[in-house]
Amino acid sequence: MPRPWSFPVALDPASGEPLTLQISRAVTADIRRGRLKAGALLPGSRTLAATLGVHRNTVLAAYRELEDEIRKALKEH
């Protein structure tokens, strides 16, 4: 059974910022606001892609970007 997920972010393809960064920054912002807690499970790539109306590879790239941000943060601390 898929995890329930609500991702209240409006992606703006015309912004000039890649969708992958828009997605990863939106998730990061939700973590900083406390909406997503440490250890919370993110939706599967297919589920999030369908929710946002983007290709699954876009979500996979956004998740890789998040992983890179986490690695950098851990190295700094």
Image (cartoon, helix red, strand yellow):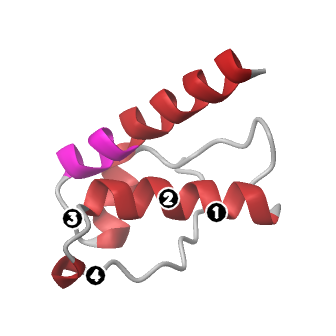
Specify start and end residues of the magenta stretch as a single range: 56-62
**65 or 48, which lies in front?**
65
Q: Position of residue 15 (x, y in %)?
A: 24, 80
- Judged from the image, the secondary structure of the residue bearing numbered disc 4 is loop
Residue 35 seen in the figure:
no
Disc 1 vs disc 3: Cβ atoms closer than 8 Å? no
Q: Which residue in the structure is indicated by mark 4?
A: 12
Residue at the location (26% across, 67% down)?
17
Task: Identify whether 26 is placed above or below 39.
Answer: below
Distance, label 2 to label 3, CA atoms, is 16 Å
For label 2, the crowd category at 10 Å Cα-Cα, with few meaning under 14, some 14 to 19 and many 20 or more, is: some
Disc number placed over residue 25 in the picture, else none: 2
23 left or right of 57 in image: right
Q: Nearer the viewer, mark 1 or mark 3?
A: 1
Q: Main secondary structure of the magenta part?
A: helix
Q: Amino acid at mark 3?
A: Val
Distance, label 3 to label 4, CA atoms, is 12 Å
Disc number placed over residue 29 in the picture, else none: 1
Q: Amino acid at mark 1?
A: Ala
Distance, label 1 to label 3, CA atoms, is 20 Å
Q: Position of residue 34 (x, y in %)?
A: 82, 61
Q: Earlier in the sequence, mark 3 or mark 4?
A: 4
